[in-house]
Amino acid sequence: MSKPRRVVLLLSTIGFAALFGLATPAAAKSGDEAPLLPRATVAALAEEISGEAAKRDLDFLSRQHRMRGSRGFRAAAEFVAGELRADGLTGVEIVEIPADGKTFYGTQRSRRPWDAEFAELWELKKTGDAWATLHRLASWDTLPLSLAQDSESADVTAELVDVGAGSKPEDYSGRDVRGKIVLVSGQPEPVVPLAVGRFGAAGIVSYAQNQRTAWWGEDENLVRWGHAGSFNATPTFAFMVSLKTARGFQERLRAGETIRLHATVRAGQHDGHYDVVTATIPGADSARAPEEIVFSCHLDHPHPGANDNASGCATILEIARTFSKLIRDGKLPHPARTIRFVFPPEVEGTLSLLVLRPELAARIKAAIHLDMVGGGPETKAIFHVTRGPASLPSFVHDVAAAFGAFVNRQSAAFASGEPADVPLVALEGGKEALQADFADLTLGSDHEIYGEGSFGIPAIYLNDWPDRYIHTNFDTPANIDPTKLRRAGFIAAASGWFLANAGTRDAGVLTSLIEAASLRRAAETLARRVELAGDEANVLTRFDLWSEREVFASLARFGAVEPASRQEAERFLAARAQIFGPAPLAANVPKGDGALIFRRDPAIKGPMSVFGYDYLAAHLPAGRAEALRLADGDRYEALNLVDGRRNAQEIRDGLSAIYGPVPLADVVEFLRALAEAGVVRLR
């Protein structure tokens, strides 16, 4: 029943677009113009940016085991800083941020750096009355990924016991693991408190599989990145092995065989610091130079970590080189705003930098974050141009989508044998169409820090997902496509260059860009309304209308407004509202808990969960945070929506518009938990 109605609604919206004279996306034709930038600028960027050069930098980075605060990370940071200096950037520095496991940066408890000197896991065989080495199962020197991060030193000889997942007490029922090494299917971190802390195991061997995708568990030779836990109370070690190795162990154990292992580890946490590389291309406009556009990646991850995230780091390093060279050659002017490049440890480095340097956070107008942007066909990756939080509407995301759509058209035309002015193909790369997907917010990288309510910085997020080799020994440079790096680099560079120069003269073209994108979003809202019952359709409509008004208002952040464009925006918004018909749009009068209003403590910055440390779990009675019914995505947006003005009912309605209907009681429960932890206060 609903499908025909949705088609009618979409057709009506397309007709409305035609009424406004706004073009819908079309296939590329010869002479297809890139949006927003002059043809000469587009040509200069497209010709200079090199996927091959980015991949050469990626090759070096992927050879480092880049754990936060480690020697491998420092080697990568010094390489990046050296390249930035050689490319002529200014203010190149490696910011050293103390990390001692006690100091807090907003909601993040700093994690002590971790290094390893040596680690091997051997199977032993009995020869007479003695045990001798049979074969080596894992080696730090051969495969650093085989030692779980945050493992501590040990020299243990013990039997192997299979305990299944190892994350629940019942997994140990009837099994004596004291002094033994446990074989588990789960990540070591949640296993440590039970296996080692409670039942006395000597160590862990894990065959944890990768994130669930269509290829989950398909390749039994993959070795996954493991975590022993930065804050576990019981120091221990954990080795990571392949599913093939684990199945061999299990078959032998079921047959009654005794398997004896010898583990040697010289590793551990130590006081130190996060290293954050940063450099700038200074702005030339005296009024706008203090404002900044940030290119962001995360430099940490285990060896090889090619797509995640040597690809993002190498690509923004190539963007820095491209901008600097084109300016030096006179093909581009100096940007109006300052452009900054930041290479931190993931999430925690970004949060600590913005907390320590609030004046920097205040200067940033937008961020462009690249995390996994080079996956070739073997990775099965889909490239996404991702919007920021729905709680922070901004035209910035429409800019990125416009450039992404342009590269889609050009690359599709080229792949089909048709004329294409800007195909962006690397000589050493593929020739396939990009087929970028334009996605709503997904969490899990530094972009969520910029867009979080503490900072409110709109962030473009370019990323691959799925990737069947993420966090495994197969995430290698061999699976990286230089063409993909070049295209991701162009989308990011073009978006960043436009934003670095955007101002009053761009008000008209940006207004038109927003209008076209806004009508496409109206079609999505209409389609969603069909599936909603009762007042939920009106809840969605109210949020949609608020959001689109905020997108136009975000132009003022860049000074991209003038009287004519402001009038056009008002005319458009009034006409757009008519699409949804005469349904009542007034908000319901809140009752009871729905009328509660909370205000955030500005001193507690950041999301509630950051890499092994959950702020709510640490500041509430045991089990309380885990029992909260609100999902993770809802929690992130709910905290963003806390502004001292919205009541709980309005926050609930916002979440329902973003993710689908959610009970008011679940939202109030979460807000009261935030208040109990001191993150927010009841106004």
Image (cartoon, rainbow, N blue to C red):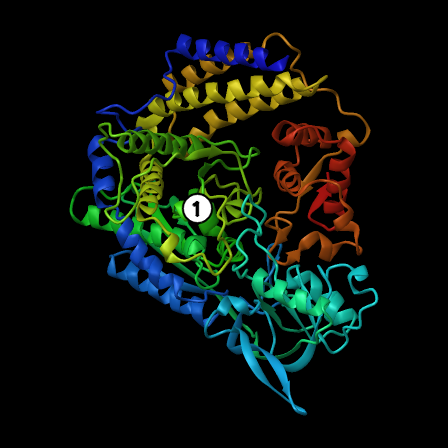
Q: Quadrant of the C terminus?
A: top right
Query: Outermost residue, bottom direction?
Result: 129
Q: Quadrant of residue 390?
A: top right
On the image, the x and y values in percent for residue 154 come to: 62, 80
In the image, residue 573 sits, relative to residue 252, either above or below, namely above
On screen, residue 220 versus residue 622, left or right, reads: left
Tell me the residue that label 1 is attached to.
369
In the image, residue 588 sits, relative to residue 436, either above or below, namely above
On screen, residue 269 versus residue 318, left or right, reads: right
Q: Nearer the viewer, residue 496 or 202?
A: 202
On screen, residue 323 versus residue 570, left or right, reads: left
Q: Is residue 89 visible?
A: yes
Mark 1, secondary structure of its residue: strand
In the image, residue 397 sits, relative to residue 444, either above or below, namely above
Q: Amino acid at mark 1?
A: His
Q: Residues within 10 Å of mark 1 (few under 14, many from 20)?
A: many
Q: Is residue 69 visible?
A: no
On the image, the x and y values in percent for residue 397 come to: 44, 33
Q: Nearer the viewer, residue 620 or 436?
A: 436
Q: Nearer the viewer, residue 308 or 459?
A: 308
Query: Outermost residue, left direction?
Result: 329
